[in-house]
Structure formats: C-alpha cells, structure tokens
Image (tube, rainbow, N blue to C red):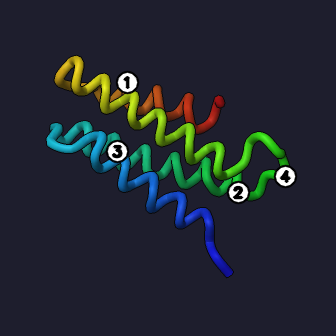
Amino acid sequence: MINFTNIAKVEFEKVLAKSIEHQNSDVIEASDIIKNMALISFTRFAKSSSLYFSLGHVLSTSITGLHILHAMRCRDGLVRPAQIINLMASVLFCN
C-alpha cells in the first residue's frame, strides 16, 4: 500500500530545505519543529473524509507557505524562528 503521508512529508522537506538554506542554527532548529508539525498535519488530513481539507490541499498550501518564507528571507535577509513557526503553524493547522 502506498503511504501518501510519507510522500507528502518528503516533498515538503525538499521545499523546506530550499527555503531555509544557509541560515543560523536557531532557524535550523525551527525547521525540525516544522517538520514534526507537518507530519502531524499530513497524518491528520490524510485520515480526513472532508472533500476540501485533504492531504493534497494541505501539501499545496504548506508548500505555498514555504515559498512565502523564502520570499521573506530574500526580502529581509533573515526570518526569525518565531516567525517561521507561527506562519507554518497557521498554514498547517488553520487553513
């Protein structure tokens, strides 16, 4: 059986690695927290019977959130770990 949650996790982590590359250790630690949050969210929505809030929807919105983080980093030079965690928590759990 195909485990779509792990596939989503791998795709998310690829984009995450590009979004936070070359940043300080606090941001790297925040990325570990985001990876765990994403896995929780993906698992929760993979079990959902909702037509709108599906695993595919959460994956696409989370990747959009990572692109927003990347744009913030390009604009400002650095994104604070608290900003990263707050933005991704809202994208992963409040969309």
Residue 13 horizontal/vertical position (percent): 39, 54
Query: In this picture, is 75 found above or below 14?
Result: above
Q: Residue 49: which numbered mark, if any?
A: 4
Label located before the other in sequence (3 or 2) = 3
Residue 80 horizontal/vertical position (percent): 28, 25
The amino acid sitting under disc 4 is: Ser
Label located before the other in sequence (2 or 1) = 2
Q: Quadrant of residue 28?
A: top left
Is disc 1 placed on a helix, strand or loop? helix
Q: Quadrant of residue 29?
A: top left
Residue at mark 2: 46
Residue at mark 1: 83
Q: CA distance from mark 1 to mark 3?
A: 11 Å
Q: CA distance from mark 2 to mark 4?
A: 8 Å
Q: CA distance from mark 2 to mark 1?
A: 26 Å
For this orientation, the residue located farthest to the top is 76
Question: Decide: marks 2, 4 in contact (CB < 8 A)?
Answer: no
Label located before the other in sequence (1 or 3) = 3
Residue at mark 3: 31
The amino acid sitting under disc 2 is: Ala
The amino acid sitting under disc 1 is: Gln
Q: Left or right of 30: which side holds 56? A: right
Is disc 2 placed on a helix, strand or loop? helix
